[in-house]
Amino acid sequence: MDEIDRTIVNLLRTAGRTSYAELARRVGLTAPSVQDRVTKLEKNGVITGYQAAIDPESIGLGITALIGIIPDSSADHVRICDRLRAIPQIESCYFLAGVECYQLKVRVPKMADLEQLIHRVGAIDGVAQTRTTITLSTKWEDRPQPITTGESEHGID
Amino acid sequence: MDEIDRTIVNLLRTAGRTSYAELARRVGLTAPSVQDRVTKLEKNGVITGYQAAIDPESIGLGITALIGIIPDSSADHVRICDRLRAIPQIESCYFLAGVECYQLKVRVPKMADLEQLIHRVGAIDGVAQTRTTITLSTKWEDRPQPITTGESEHGID
DNA sequence: TGGTCCGGTCGATCTCGTCCACCTGTTGAG
DNA sequence: CTCAACAGGTGGACGAGATCGACCGGACCA
């Protein structure tokens, strides 16, 4: 994980379809070397995948909401997590330090779908209460912050 | 935006570096046709970009937190938004319907950085109060939900 | 000194991306 | 009904990219 790897990661983070040849030009190596580095980054779990960013509204997911979950005292978190994972509308799921121990980011086409979704989450065993907030607009999302020099050690590679 | 477009989007959403030739095989067209469709999807704003998914810990961003912002009554939201946008650690920013009218998802290397970041956000003109929640773990994030048939009209293309 | 490993280059080959000419089915006007 | 215009697809050609194996040079160590 040297300076060249960081540059490659920064480039792929903002332009995930950049060819190996183009990456090679940017970092001053040849294509096979870059490919080798990228393969290692993938194998080491630094790069976990590639995804096209889609405008949610264009595919009929015009409503975004955040749902906080307050568990009851007997909650089985492995079970809750499994049940949540089975709900496709939940795009992100964070386990939090707080009274609301989960926060979900969900997307649905219509309000009726959101209502149904809230009921479904609320019905999960161990969920005492949910608190939903509608997002009026997404200012930005998943903006990659450039990697700084690895001044702290992370034991990667 | 027909069935083939939806298939292409679903494929690119989960495997953003899939070649046009491979996409063509999957949808039963030729590579030039697929490329044409993808170009149109990009031009119409359906596909807004491509990004490699990176494990945050691997690049020294081990701490994720959610920051809620409560504005004061005289808040100028354009100004607040601009100031927030200038902070690179804020990866996502949602404008919410609620007392906390923004929620930020931030990532930093160390707790000290988070503290500094909270102070910086709190110092923005129009921000009355912030409320920060640490995420103990990310169960999953940015999981693409497959596009269903466009039963509602969205006026795309 | 010599062996080994790591990471890079180079060259050959195959696949992919991209452009262009052509084909087909649909639509709408005369 | 016929014909022109058009959208969207196919197929071929050619340049660029991906990928593999062979080789090279420096660092490390016995």
Image (cartoon, coloured by chain):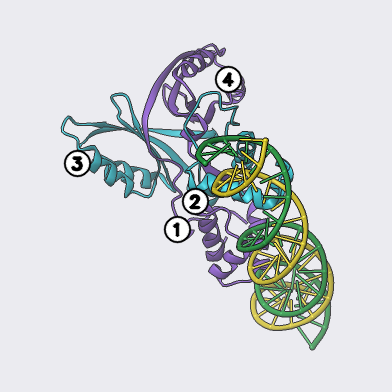
Chain colours: A purple, B cyan, C green, D yellow
Instruction: Say whether residue A124 is left or right of residue B19.
Output: left
Q: Residues within 10 Å of mark 1 (few under 14, many from 20)?
A: few
**Tag on residue A148?**
1
Distance from Cα at disc 1 to Cα at disc 4: 37 Å
The chain that hosts pointer 3 is B
Q: What chain does mark 1 sit on?
A: A
Per the image, the residue denoted by label 2 is B60
Asked if labels 3 and 1 touch by Cβ distance under 8 angstroms, the answer is no
User: Could you give the CA–CA distance between mark 1 and mark 3, rounded to whole angstroms?
Assistant: 28 Å
Tags 3 and 2 both on a single chain: yes
- Nearer the observer: mark 3 or 2; the answer is 3
Residue at 62%, 37% (x, y): give it: B10
Depth check, mark 1 against mark 3: the one in front is 3
The label on residue B152 is: none
Three-letter amino acid code of the residue under disc 1 = Thr
Q: Which of labels 4 and 2 is toward the front?
A: 4
Instruction: Residue under label 3, please give it.
Output: B125
Query: Nearest the camera: A1 or A74?
Result: A1
Indicate the position of residue B109 as horizontal and vertical percent values. Answer: 44, 48
- Any part of residue B55 in sight: no
- Comparing C8 with B135, the one in front is C8
Disc 2 chain ID: B
Disc 1 is placed on an element classified as loop
Q: CA distance from mark 4 to mark 3?
A: 40 Å
Task: Report the front residue among D1 and B35.
Answer: D1
Pointer 2 and pointer 1: residues touching (CB < 8 Å)? yes
Classify mark 3: residues with Cα within 10 Å, few (<14), some (14-19) or many (20+): some
Which numbered disc flags the more N-terminal residue, 1 or 4? 4
